[in-house]
Image (cartoon, helix red, strand yellow):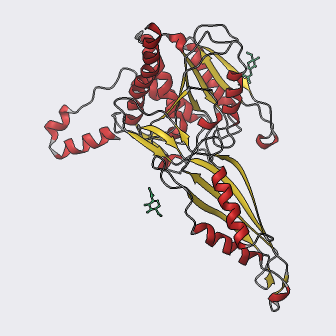
Amino acid sequence: MRSGHVLASACLLGGAIAATHQENAPAYRDELLSFLKDLVDIHSITGNEKQVGEFVIDYLTDLGYTAVNQTLPPTERFDNLERFNVVAWRGGDKHRPKNPRLVVSSHIDTVPPYIPYSIDDGEITSDTEIRGRGSVDDKSSLAAQVVAVEELVRNKEINAEDVMLAFVVGEEVTGDGMRAFSNLVAAMDPPLGLEAGIFGEPTVNKLACGHKGHMACTIRARGKAAHSGYPWLGKSANEVLVRAMMEIMSTEFDGSERFGNTTVNIGVLEGGVAANVVPQDAVAKLAFRIATGPQVGGQKAIIDKLDEILKRVDPEALSAECENGYGAVYCDCEVDGFETLIVNYGTDLPNFDGGEGFKKYLYGPGNIFVAHSDHEALKVGSIEKAVEDYKKLIKHVLGDSKSSVEL
Ligand SMILES: *[C@@H]1O[C@H](CO)[C@@H](O)[C@H](O)[C@H]1NC(C)=O
Ligand SMILES: *[C@@H]1O[C@H](CO)[C@@H](O)[C@H](O)[C@H]1NC(C)=O
């Protein structure tokens, strides 16, 4: 995206200058873009990740990795389909890596519907646009990560055994893939000793300092049905629920300097059966984006405030059920040469428990604003910048702690 800007301003200055900006395509461009095309070509809507998993295993095996499937237990939710994470490393044996210090990870599932791959006509430049489901979220992260590690290994800039790869299923729905991978790592005996993780999600090529927490709540109002001509004989669940929603909308939930304000979206409102019946039942579904920590338990303050509101409005009629809550998630973003940002979407980061001192980095090409849309797309320049930036991040992690060990 940045290179797009450079080209656009160069064009304003005339052809001669534009020509001096003719790019030096990186040597890995063809490899990177054809890998990404193959990934996007394969449908991998959550639940249906088997084929893309097999493709990634073959690809990594050809590169010389030990690449294995970590099969998840079948669930009804995904029609009992066979699903697996791809876990890969160099060194060690086929049961476990030697002692990798860094895990590099993306997810291989996408949201629906499938949108086929396409690319702008003409010569490929860094301004060329690539489209299709998963092109941004999350297959360009995956492709850029693999190429970045390859580059570093080929150029002997890192020890190949220091890095392990984890490409997981299920991120878009339940995070079951990352939780399974986290459990696999936790069960290793002796422990792997991972020091850090680099997680790929679209961050417009900036390094995220964290993302907001999340909690989904269902609020129910229970009233009493009656003829609408005699409302005093019943109790309107809709009216109670609307009063509760008004209170929620005018409440300021705690925020923080790093993460901004906690926000709430009233995503679903349902209630009643007919215009002439006093409604007995009403329900609202809310999503909170939580701007305070800690990651584990940070949602508690929101639950308490919500309870307080419901008690104030009508404790008999109202109840709340909240699930999958976690507070704001911190990432490490103190690395030279990166712009930073905070993102408001959820990721797999809370589903990986690296233990005390484990560092998490969140970075990827492309923009979340188009990620789940029907116009999901990104520029070649963004993907190539991601390769370079992943190289920097990997060297930051491995270089850093290596020098402290040598001391
Ligand atoms: C997973 O790996 C095992 C061991 O290599 C293999 O037998 C099995 O067929 C693989 N499953 C899938 C779905 O690829
Ligand atoms: C947070 O909310 C306050 C009060 O509603 C508002 O003034 C402020 O601009 C918000 N901050 C951000 C970062 O949105």
Q: How many marks?
A: 0
Residue in front for this viewpoint, 63 or 267 = 267
- The location of residue 126, given as percent across then percent down, is 34, 35
Residue in front for this viewpoint, 305 or 169 = 305
Residue in front for this viewpoint, 9 or 19 = 9
Residue lying at 83% horizontally and 91% vertically, measured from the top left = 230
Q: Quadrant of residue 163?
A: top right
Specify the quarter for ligand 1: top right
Q: Is residue 193 left or right of residue 82?
A: left
Residue lying at 47% horizontally and 16% vertically, measured from the top left = 401
- The location of residue 378, given as percent across then percent down, is 43, 41
Residue 86 can be seen, yes or no:
yes
Residue lying at 39% horizontally and 35% vertically, measured from the top left = 380
Vertical placement of residue 308 versus 58, above or below: below
Residue at the bottom extreme of this rendering: 229
- The location of residue 280, given as percent across then percent down, is 82, 75
Query: Which quadrant is home to the N terminus?
Result: top left
Residue 285 can be seen, yes or no:
no
Q: Quadrant of residue 18?
A: top left
Residue lying at 46% horizontally and 21% vertically, measured from the top left = 397
Residue in front for this viewpoint, 377 or 362 = 362
Q: Quadrant of residue 231?
A: bottom right
Query: Which quadrant is home to the C terminus?
Result: top left
- The location of residue 260, given as percent across then percent down, is 47, 52
Q: Is residue 344 left or right of residue 83?
A: left
Q: Is residue 393 left or right of residue 213?
A: left
